Amino acid sequence: MKFLYRFVIFTLFVVSSFGDGDDDDVGYEVTNKTFPKGFLFGVATAAYQIEGGWDEDGKGEQIWDMWIHSNPKIVADGSTGDVASDSYHKYKEDVACMTEVGVHYYRFSIAWARILPNGRTNKVNKAGVDYYLNLLKELKANGIEAMVTLYHWDLPTALHDIGGWTNPEIVGLFAEYAQLCYELFGDYVKTWVTINEPKQICHGGYGGSGYAPGINSEGLGEYLCARYVLLAHAKAWHIYDTEFRSKQNGRITIVIDSDWFEPTTDSAEDKEAAETKIQFVFGMYANPVFIGDWPQVMIDRVADRSLKEGFDQTRLPPFSSEEVADIRGTYDFLAINHYTSYMVSAAAEPNIDNPSWVKDAGGNVYQKDTWQQAAIGWFRIVPWGIGKLLKWIKATYGDLEIVITENGVSDRNGTLEDDHRIRYLKLYMSHLLDAMYEDNINITGYTLWSIIDNFEWTQGFNGKLGIYYVNMSDPERPRVPKKSSKYYANVIKTLCLQDSCE
């Protein structure tokens, strides 16, 4: 028999740019319906991607600092996030851009190691705390609400050194960090996100070594990570719910990212393969929170494959009945990040050899050649996918309030005449409106990624997603509005995607 929990990763997130081909929306007409009054529009960023100041004013090292400094060739253009968009020094300019566009809220993340250099609450870095307080005060002064993410992939290196998200101790440490943030910043924050995109954290960081911390533990470490991420989220949610909600009157949830997976045909086999895939991608993290426990198809498939691989028990670490109850219901709304879609067809069962989350899910997953190709890797533009994903979510989890917490598109050259981005936003938001009007899906907010060009993880500065251009070779990092910033501002002002609406 094999030992079950040897430490054991994989990557999935890239950014896009329009290329040749179509997006399979031929003949689709952008709706002339309007967003309802009270619908909220925002923009999003993440600390490591924009702040810079990687070791300034007492900030501790985090895993992306460590990983990229140790392996500079892993970033496509050889850049780092050491300076990034320099928002540590230029946050007021960022807020000025948001004010110019007219957004209602700003979703940003706190760098854990900036306020707790060693990841633990026994050493609080005042300069880091002051930075976020100053940013929050600047937002408030400009009438912009804060949506704050506690964890956007940047684990303090000191906690990685004890096993990171594969060590059960991380659950309590994250909860202590979250509690401190509620105490320090809660008077300025009405919406909290505990953890952003656990799929990327676990399968990118502990499944195939494609993201920091670069641990290759497919089929084992990635599942341990998922377990502790969900338990950490739940613990942080309960602390807010019991100790802070009544006096701060805020809301809190987890952000789950998902592509849409479309069956290749109407055959029962293809439908089953597509459903299994989305349960392994979205359901793996949504099911414990919104229903309770891992999806049954995951439990069954991982257990079956584990035994065939020679393990004496399933590789999917089970939740106790108490843990199931603790995680279930830890949300105030459903937050979704979405960028692209895939086709799925039934396929022969993957070989029983080296285990992995991808093999456990099975199926033949691909994108059509006719879909618009990204400049980088796998990302193709499939606007109708967001509508299908939303309909599936309602059918699976019920009539939940939904906020889109990331959606956007990149290019390589940062052109100011970014008509491709306007087209992308128009099509994706049109399908969003269709879901609201035609399927009665309760969507209350849309968050564009991103307000400014930033450091796009392993793509470095190759992927430019901002509606403001930032010249990363200019030490001053000036913010220059793109055409898309004017378009988004007009949508926010008029609630309309077209020149005029009904």
Image (cartoon, rainbow, N blue to C red):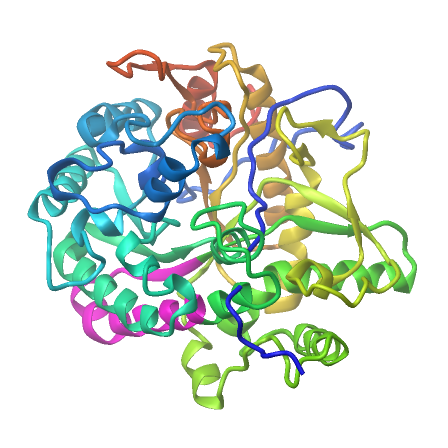
Res 485 seen here: yes
Left or right: where does residue 202 sit relative to residue 70? right
Our reading of the magenta stretch's main secondary structure is: helix
| Residue 86 figure quarter | top left
Residue 6 picture location, percent across and down: 53, 71
Q: Quadrant of the C terminus?
A: top right
Up the image or down, 148 lies above or below 284; here it is above
Residue 10 x/y as whole percent:
58, 51
Q: Residue at x 57, y 47 (%)?
A: 11
Pick the residue in front: 308 or 362.
308
- Residue at 37 percent across and 25 percent down: it is 452
- Placement of 125 over or under 283, stated as above or below: above
Q: Is residue 328 left or right of residue 314?
A: left
- Rendered location of residue 284, percent (x, y): 58, 66
The verdict on residue 301 being magenta is: no
Magenta highlight on residue 248: yes
Tell me the quarter of the picture where residue 42 sits. top left
Number of disc labels: 0
- Residue depicted at x 16% and y 67%: 247
Q: In which quadrant of the rendered image does the N terminus lie?
A: bottom right
In the image, farthest residue toward the right: 267
Q: Position of residue 154 (x, y in %)?
A: 34, 48
Whether 209 is drawn above or below 397: the answer is above
| The residue stretch that appears in magenta | 228-254
Q: Tell me the residue at 40%/37% (across/down).
A: 68
From the viewer's perspective, tell me whether residue 9 is left or right of residue 139: right
Q: Indicate whether 14 appears above or below 272.
A: above
